[in-house]
């Protein structure tokens, strides 16, 4: 929401990959959320994915809009959620994905004048930052408790610098003994 005031409309659709994995027909629900945000309507009465895509395309073309699509994992999701016609020149569409070439696979980039886009690769936390974050959630301090040093380093390496993984793993091992830490990693590594 930091820059949403610069646009007439905005929408943040989060965890697309997870939601699509959990439900079969979730794309229409995500379209309704996006269209409702853009049009500032609470209820969108639409039961057809293609018709909803068409309405989204029209809405995106008419007003400068900020759209964030978080956790996209395939080009079909992009095509369904923002369409293939383009958007208002003052708009900004932000996609977060683990699939770097996804934008080139999306139909929007195959139009006669494709939108200007920039890619930014993000990297995980360093070994030091990872250990500090894990320890904060596991012990409430930035360094491992005495006797936990080896297991804490093992845990932080296991998470590969991913902040959410470090937070979840650290929190799940909070107040556990060293043997439980060791058993957890043996299970996770197998």
Image: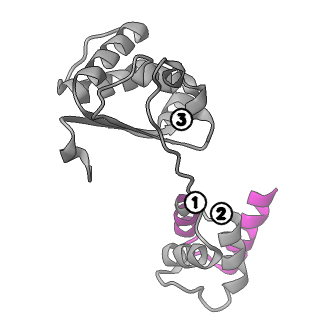
How far apart are labels 1 and 3 at the CA level?
A: 17 Å
Residue at disc 1, secondary structure:
helix
Q: Of the numbered discs in the image, which one, if any, rests on residue 17?
A: 3
Residue marked by disc 2: 159
Residue drawn at (32%, 28%), measured in percent from left and top? 34
Residue drawn at (27%, 35%), measured in percent from left and top? 90
* Side of 103 relative to 1 (left or right): right
130 shown above or below 71: below
Label 1 crowd bin: few (<14), some (14–19), many (20+), radius 10 Å: some
- Quarter of the image holding residue 12? top left
Residue 122 magenta-highlighted: no
Q: Which is more N-terminal, label 1 or label 2? A: 2
How far apart are labels 2 and 3 at the CA level?
A: 20 Å
* Side of 182 relative to 168 (left or right): right
Q: Of the numbered discs in the image, which one, if any, rests on residue 107?
A: none
Magenta-highlighted residues? 164-190
Location of residue 8 in the rendering, given as x and y in whole percent from the top left corner: 18, 35
Location of residue 95 in the rendering, given as x and y in whole percent from the top left corner: 46, 39
Going by the picture, which residue comes out furthest to the right? 190
Label 2 crowd bin: few (<14), some (14–19), many (20+), radius 10 Å: many
- Quarter of the image holding residue 145? bottom right
Residue 188 magenta-highlighted: yes
Residue marked by disc 1: 165
Residue drawn at (40%, 16%), measured in percent from left and top? 85
Q: Which is more N-terminal, label 3 or label 2? A: 3
Location of residue 173 in the rendering, given as x and y in whole percent from the top left corner: 58, 70
How far apart are labels 2 and 1 at the CA level?
A: 6 Å
Residue drawn at (49%, 26%), measured in percent from left and top? 78
> Front-most of 187 and 110?
110
Report if the CB atoms under discs 2 and 1 are less than 8 Å apart: yes
């Amino acid at each position: 929401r930091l820059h949403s005031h610069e646009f007439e409309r905005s929408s943040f659709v989060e965890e697309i990959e997870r939601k699509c994995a959990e439900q079969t027909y979730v794309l229409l629900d995500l379209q309704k959320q996006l269209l409702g945000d853009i049009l500032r309507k609470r209820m969108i009465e639409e039961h057809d994915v293609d018709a909803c895509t068409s309405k989204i395309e029209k809405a995106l073309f008419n007003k400068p809009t900020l759209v964030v699509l978080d956790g996209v994992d395939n080009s079909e999701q992009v095509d369904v959620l923002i369409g293939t016609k383009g958007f208002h020149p003052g708009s900004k569409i932000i996609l977060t994905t683990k699939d770097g070439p996804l934008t080139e696979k999306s139909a929007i980039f195959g139009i006669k004048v494709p939108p200007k886009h920039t890619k930014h690769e993000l990297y995980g936390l360093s070994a030091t930052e990872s250990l500090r974050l894990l320890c904060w959630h596991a012990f409430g301090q930035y360094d491992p408790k005495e006797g936990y040093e080896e297991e804490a380093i093992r845990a932080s390496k296991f998470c590969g610098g991913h902040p959410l993984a470090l937070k979840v793993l650290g929190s799940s091992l909070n107040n556990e003994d060293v043997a439980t830490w060791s058993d957890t990693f043996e299970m996770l590594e197998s």
